[in-house]
Amino acid sequence: MSVAGLRKQFYKASQMMSEKVGGAEGTKLDEDFKDLEKKADVTSKAISDVLCKTAEYLQPNPASRARLTMVNTMSKMRGQVKSPGYPQAEGLLGECMLKYGRDMGEDTNFGGALVEMGEAMKRLAEVKDSLDIDVKQNFIDPFQTIVDKDLKDIQHHLKKLEGRRLDYDYKKKRQGKIPDEELKLAAEKFEESKEVAETSMQNLLDTDVEQVSQLTALVESQLQFHRQSVEVLEELAKSMRERVNKAQSQPRQKRMPASRPSFDCLEPEDSNGGWSPSAAPSSSPSTGEAYPVYLYKASRSSSPKNTNFLKVYSLSGHPKCRFVSSSEQIWKNFALHNLLPNGSSAVNGCRQNESPNS
């Protein structure tokens, strides 16, 4: 930087300190300029914030936005023109449904429905990709041009205007100590910067027609996206209703539970209680076949009724146990529950207090 440049920077810093600390008043701009500056500032903030929120609308996930920004930066550094798009949530959901639907099998009701819905979600992801492309071309790129060019130009001209104002006020305060030509030149530069800044801000405000057109393009892109999404979802909903009706109309296959095995325990004659096994024919009410019913006599005791039952039930661990059918077990249970307190049984016409061997 030249000596004249250093001197000018010193003048600006000195004037700024006088205004901030000493309370010195600088040159006031007219009200029209202040009003124009205020409108341009609001417009600049609106464009910048709308661009930021539009990116969030297209991809709500901040991690995905950050990753995509990094990938786009690397693509530009490598000279790649085409950059990848956002990872659409609809596409990720569709891939998940397709994977598990195919694992289950498309011939199953649930698996086929998952595959069909997964394909529909992939179509929705493609529709969302089209929305991203349309919004970027017709809305984001034009607004980004305003941010990168027009708004930067306005900020540059306002900053230059402020610097020249400080230089002019410093020289005006030292009037008589500096040449009049230098003061006049500072005043002319200040007015020139003021006009340039005013023109740049006015140009921004005059482009409201183009800005409204870009907003209209954003609305049209969204409308097209929702129309295509409705078509995909209506087709999917119709197919799902048909699947439900078809599944409800088909009879369900009934699975008969397998009969549970039970044990028949045979007690030897010399066991405690003195019972010997005897078979009494019994007719099954379900099949009409005769099944043997084994009756056991427990030893007499002074214990309650359930003692006889417990003694009979304890024979289930005998090594001579054999499997019997469920129908036979019904008759055996009937025999056990009809044991009398004195140790005799009354089953299939047996008289009370009569031994089974008689």
Image (cartoon, rainbow, N blue to C red):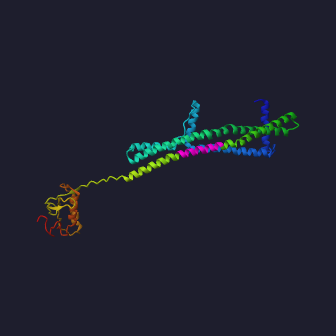
Viewer-side residue, 41 vs 125? 125
Residue 316 in sight in this render: yes
Magenta-colored stretch includes residue 243? no
> In this image, 41 relative to 84: left or right?
right
Which span is picked out in magenta? 213-228
- Count of numbered circles in the view: 0
146 horizontally vs 74: left or right? right
Is residue 65 at least partly visible in the picture?
A: no
Where, by quadrant of the figure, is residue 170 drawn?
A: top right
Q: Quadrant of residue 267?
A: bottom left
Where does the image place residue 262, in percent across and percent down from the top left? 23, 56
Q: Residue furthest left?
A: 358
Secondary structure mostly seen in the magenta stretch = helix
Residue at image position (23%, 58%) is 326
Image vertical order of residue 274 relative to residue 193, above or below: below
On the image, the x and y values in percent for residue 204 come to 71, 41
Q: Residue furthest right?
A: 176
- Quadrant of the image for the C terminus? bottom left
**Relative image position of residue 71 (x, y in whole percent):** 56, 36
**Picture residue at 85% right of the left edge, 35% below the top:** 184
Q: Quadrant of the N terminus?
A: top right
- Residue at x-position 43% and y-position 46%: 114
Q: For residue 223: magenta?
A: yes
Q: Is residue 165 above or below residue 298?
A: above
Is residue 328 rendered to the left or right of residue 143?
Answer: left
Please indicate whether residue 46 sits to the left or right of residue 16 in the image.
left
Q: Nearer the viewer, residue 240 or 180?
A: 240
Residue 335, how many percent across, how many down? Answer: 20, 64
Of 169 and 75, the residue lying toward us: 75
